């Protein structure tokens, strides 16, 4: 009945009374753990299936039993997907759109956030309120006028039609304002005493300090726009301006169920950049995603 | 909701208190004025042009019939009355409401269960594994997810039916029946989005002071009673935010039904946003599409307002 050997130092520090409770897991605990395990398998299973199936030859991709592990991989599907669609073009389009939106959002949000955090002027409160209120407006409500606007500007069916309207960001501005408000005011005072201009105070002191906040804005923008489907579906018309998700959906539509590994190869390729962000920027992404929920 | 603000939340009070730093006022203020204008311009003008103006345009457009080619024609409230009389629009709104109720309920209960369970005793790496796993679908595109899920739910060759038949259950015609298709849209949507709710709730639960659980232990409280009397009341502000966010997101569902079913069979999985899209860009009825969009926006605003009302009445603060 004593605590098993594998409950190490953590238990040692606490009161000896607790030891019994840290012993054998109760049936409830086991059931709870199994539930977690089932959920994890349900999440990872489809991803593993997608990866493994993309590595089967197109002719046997839909054969049963399905595969969840890429034993004896076959990369035909990957060369085939590049033959079926202009994959390089799609990737470049997506990369360009995403990179420009992310950069634009980081810069404009940092600038506006800085002003809202540190400068007071007539109507600043109201203006910030309006910016916040636009967060409630879903993209679907504005899409029809935005489509016309973009058309009127002569940008119909260009990548700029996707990029320009996406740069002003209410959430990013809100996030950067919060970030700047968290930075100490003393630097500004010291800089002012030294005779630094407000521009210099921003560019040499506060902007570098706010880089982690800007990283959050940039990664959120990347995650959203690399994956977005609705706006590209409406704002681009010719295939040469498609982004990756749009290209893949139309590929699936064209191929039917004939060669699913080809479509899945495209899906896997589209996941790679997101996966890189997931590995290296997960903390920023988590902070950014949950920032709005704790205001 | 200040009580649950996590680490990087800034010290608002202090910043405002020490903000006006007067020294060389005159020389500074001119440069500051220019900077204020220059720094705000991209965001404020951009939002004016691409958000505020479009909303106003939508409001005007909603009273017109316009196919972009011929001159717009004033039709009064007809676009709005058609929302009720047009069967497809009516059905799609009903679908969306049912979808929101089912998907959000499932998403919240799943996320809450997992968030509580993952706090249980386990090695740190395992907790990290679960957390990363549940978070993972959030980084994928809804379009890509729907693409592979459509294959997985294929009636003859799909993995799901293969699993079902292997454990002795009948194969289900997932995407070709109205119930099946609606269920698939919900499942695929929840699969991708529960991680977000999970993350928010995890933050809320983590901020509950440990002493409260120790006190509950001393009172002899067991699992369920601890959850009911400590976790649930203290996590309720977070839960409210999480549910409102989930409802607002679910009201705008588009990618999943578009890719999985194109709204079919029949109109069974057609969502409100799909109807906005089709009305505008396939039937070229831009006025009617604006009217539908506005109704959706009002719904979203009502949910947000309800949050403020509810948070005053039902939520327990620490």
Image (cartoon, coloured by chain):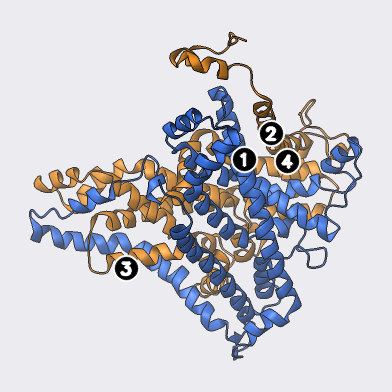
Chain colours: A orange, B blue
* Badge 2 and badge 1 both on one subunit: no
**Distance CA(mark 2)–CA(mark 3):** 48 Å
Tell me, for residue B113, which label it has, or none.
Answer: 1
At x 64% / y 44%, what residue is drawn? B110
Q: Secondary structure at mark 3?
A: helix
**Distance CA(mark 3)–CA(mark 4):** 49 Å
Which tag is nearer the camera, tag 1 or tag 3? 1
**Distance CA(mark 1)–CA(mark 3):** 41 Å
Counting residues from the N terminus, which is met first, the one under dot 3 or under dot 4? 3
**Distance CA(mark 4)–CA(mark 2):** 31 Å
Counting residues from the N terminus, which is met first, the one under dot 2 or under dot 3? 2
Q: Which residue is mark 4?
A: A265
Q: Which residue is mark 3?
A: A126
Which tag is nearer the camera, tag 2 or tag 3? 2
| Residue A109 image-quadrant placement | bottom left
> Could you tell whether B111 is left or right of B177 in the image?
left
Which tag is nearer the camera, tag 4 or tag 2? 2
């Amino acid at each position: 009945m004593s605590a098993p050997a594998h409950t190490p130092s953590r238990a040692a520090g606490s009161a000896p009374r607790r030891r019994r409770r840290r012993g054998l897991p109760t049936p409830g605990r086991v059931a709870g753990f199994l539930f977690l395990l089932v959920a994890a398998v349900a999440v990872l299973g489809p991803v593993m299936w997608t990866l493994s199936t993309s590595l089967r030859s197109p002719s046997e991709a839909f054969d049963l039993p399905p595969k969840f592990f890429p034993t004896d991989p076959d990369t035909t599907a990957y060369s085939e997907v590049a033959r079926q669609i202009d994959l390089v073009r799609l990737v470049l389009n997506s990369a360009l759109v995403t990179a420009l939106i992310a950069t634009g959002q980081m810069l404009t949000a940092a600038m506006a956030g800085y002003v809202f955090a540190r400068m007071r002027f007539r109507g600043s409160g109201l203006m910030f309120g309006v910016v916040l209120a636009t967060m409630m407006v879903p993209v679907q409500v504005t899409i029809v006028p935005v489509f016309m606007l973009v058309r009127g500007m002569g940008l119909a069916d260009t990548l700029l039609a996707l990029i320009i309207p996406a740069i002003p960001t209410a959430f990013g501005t809100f996030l950067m304002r919060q970030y700047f408000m968290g930075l100490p005011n003393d630097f500004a005072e010291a800089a002012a005493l030294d005779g630094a201009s407000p521009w210099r105070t921003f560019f040499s002191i506060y902007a570098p300090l706010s880089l982690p906040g800007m990283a959050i804005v940039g990664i959120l923008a990347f995650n959203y726009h690399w994956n977005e489907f609705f706006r590209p579906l409406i704002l681009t018309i010719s295939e040469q301006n498609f982004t990756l998700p749009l290209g893949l959906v139309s590929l699936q539509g064209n191929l039917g169920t004939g060669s699913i590994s080809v479509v899945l190869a495209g899906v896997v390729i589209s996941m790679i950049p997101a996966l890189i962000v997931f590995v290296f920027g997960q903390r920023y992404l988590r902070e950014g995603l949950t920032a709005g929920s704790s205001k | 909701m200040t009580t649950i603000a996590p680490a990087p939340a800034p010290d608002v009070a202090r910043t405002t208190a020490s903000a006006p730093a007067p020294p060389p006022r005159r020389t500074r203020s001119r440069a500051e004025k220019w900077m204020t204008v220059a720094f705000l311009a991209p965001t404020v003008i951009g939002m004016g042009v691409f958000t505020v103006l479009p909303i106003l345009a939508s409001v005007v457009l909603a009273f017109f019939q316009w196919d972009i080619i011929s001159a717009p024609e004033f039709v009064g409230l007809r676009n709005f009355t058609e929302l009720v009389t047009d069967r497809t629009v009516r059905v799609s709104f009903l679908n969306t409401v049912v979808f929101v109720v089912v998907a959000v309920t499932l998403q919240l209960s799943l996320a809450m269960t997992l968030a509580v369970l993952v706090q249980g005793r386990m090695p740190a790496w395992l907790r990290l594994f679960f957390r990363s796993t549940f978070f993972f679908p959030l980084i994928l595109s809804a379009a890509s997810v729907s693409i592979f899920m459509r294959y997985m739910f294929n009636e003859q060759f799909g993995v799901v039916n293969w699993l079902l038949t292997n454990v002795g259950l009948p194969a289900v015609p997932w995407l070709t029946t109205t119930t099946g298709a609606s269920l698939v849209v919900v499942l695929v949507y929840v699969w991708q989005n529960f991680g977000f709710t999970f993350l928010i709730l995890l933050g809320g639960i983590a901020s509950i002071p440990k002493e409260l659980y120790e006190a509950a232990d001393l009172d002899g409280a067991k699992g369920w009673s601890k959850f009911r009397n400590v976790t649930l009341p203290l996590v309720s502000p977070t839960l409210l935010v999480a549910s409102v966010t989930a409802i607002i997101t679910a009201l705008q569902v588009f990618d999943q039904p578009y890719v999985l079913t194109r709204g079919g069979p029949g109109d069974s999985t057609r969502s409100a946003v799909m109807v906005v899209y089709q009305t505008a860009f396939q039937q070229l009825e831009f006025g009617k599409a604006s009217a539908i969009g506005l109704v959706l926006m009002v719904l979203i605003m009502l949910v947000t307002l309800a949050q403020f009302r509810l948070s005053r009445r039902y939520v327990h603060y620490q």
